[in-house]
Image (cartoon, helix red, strand yellow):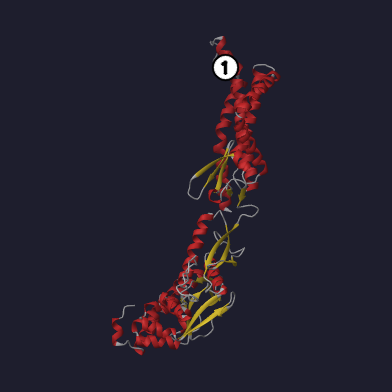
Amino acid sequence: MTDGVKNLDGKMGQVWMRMWFPLLVFSVFMILLVGKDELYSRFLANFSGVGKVIFEYGSQIGVWLSGAFLAQRFFTVFVWDGVIAGISGRPVPRLPKDFTGMLFFGIAGMGVVGTVFDKSITGIWATSGVFGIVLGIALRNVILDVFIGLSMHVEQSFRIGDWVMVHQNRRETHIVGQVIEINWRTTRLKTTEKNMIVVPNSKMGEAILTNYMQPKPYFRIDLDFALDYSVPPNRAIRLLEGAVKSLIDDTRILGQPEPEVRLDEALSYGQKYEVRFFILPTGVSPKESRHLVNRRVVEHLASAGISPAMEREIVYLEKDSRFEESDPGKDERIRGTLCANSLFGKLPETEINHLAGYVKVSEYIAGKSLFRQGNKGTSMFVLMEGLLSSEMEYQDILVSTVNESIQPTEHFGEECVLGPNVRGATVKAVTDCLVLEISAKAVMEVAGRSGAFLTLLNQETSLSKIKTMEGKHKVSKPSGSSAKKSSARKPLSSSIQTFFTDLFPSHPSSKKEKL
């Protein structure tokens, strides 16, 4: 209620700041016109006849012109910037404001000629008609811009704030920008390079134009990626969907309509996939959105050990010989994922190779749960490909859930490795995923040979518990007593770490390992 009153006061203040000057000027001239006899008798008695005539004509002309000024400002503030802008939700272009201003001042000019100077307006119209023909022939291009600008305003094919593309002869010369102004002769666009492009209205009227924000305020962007035939389609779609959906924030990249990946066509050097996603131009420009999605796709492909396909030439040295492309295979991808992980990547190569033999690779379709919060588990996981979501539920507070995303090469579920603990969150597949599952027994075998790895695992488990508590404290606003309980739990993680360090002492040679 208080914010609404403040906003109303602010708007009223802005209206008064724009209206006080024309109102003051009009009031002054009206006072001079109404009280001219009194002013003559008191202050202008010694004026010459010429001075009195100038004062009388000046006051009448001033009333007409100041009245036109006041009417134009009133119409601009309350009609164009008030009613019309409120209905359309966009600022009104300068063109209709200037047109109404010219109309009011034209009426005032005719009023001055007809009432102050007592002349016939008909003769003026006849003379202005001949003059208008001559002027129209000389300024035909300018007049064309003006009338096309008026027609564009009536038709409203685009408005201020819309992102548009003006089509040229070649695709690379198309102009993409945001409409910032529509005046009498030109339309001004602001490009993503922060430059301003001025396009004559006649050119805008003749060109083919794409409005990215009509009929909906969002639009779709398509990006093409070519991958080698050795990459199965289901794996390629999983990787590309995981990349684009990890950017969804509903202010730039939209979740509804949902992004999708389609196998577009088969090329001579690979399969072309089309990544489709929708953006809000008010939150991100088309070029910036392409940059974000391209970068994220390249990152996901690199983490999976895949490079985009490219055209190549194969030279046969012998007749009937064949070129066989090497395939890194599933084992190599598993080792690559473990090496890129923040926890296992610090192990020696021999330990990673040993651990890779005990890893179970599972595929989960979009929407399927890996495990639910509160279930018991005896393994941890590393995301190989795709995108997962982690959801923590709190039953004893008003806010029920806290969501996070899990990116490729990230691990989770480590809280169930150091004991018969329950799962701290529910993990679901956002897209089709490929997940590595590592049993607690295999992890503890590695920890038994490397005390430094066990210490790091303890730290990861403690951080996971602290993060869970912090998430709960954020949504429940804990009191001072709950903060004391949180601080009282800190020695418990230290005790767990000391216990397992004593239980699995580090090998003498492992003390020199750097993790």
Give the amino acid type for the residue marked by disc 1 in the picture. Answer: Phe
The residue located at (51%, 79%) in the rendering is 435
Residue at the extreme front: 319
Please give left or right for residue 305 compared with residue 351 in the image: right
Res 424 visible: no
Residue 143 occupies which quadrant of the picture?
top right
Q: Quadrant of residue 445?
A: bottom left
Q: Residue 297: percent from the left, percent from the top? A: 50, 66
Question: Residue extending furthest right?
Answer: 122
Task: Give 476 or 43, whichever is nearer the viewer.
Answer: 476
Where does residue 498 sit, x and y in percent of width and height? Answer: 35, 85
Quadrant hosting residue 352: bottom left
Q: Position of residue 144 (x, y in %)?
A: 63, 34
Identify whether 363 is placed above or below 50: below
Q: Residue at x 60, y 57 (%)?
A: 219
In the image, 341 versus 75, the foreground residue is 341
The residue carrying pointer 1 sits among few (fewer than 14), some (14 to 19) or many (20 or more) residues within 10 Å by Cα, namely some
For mark 1, give the secondary structure. helix
Q: Which residue is mark 1?
A: 55
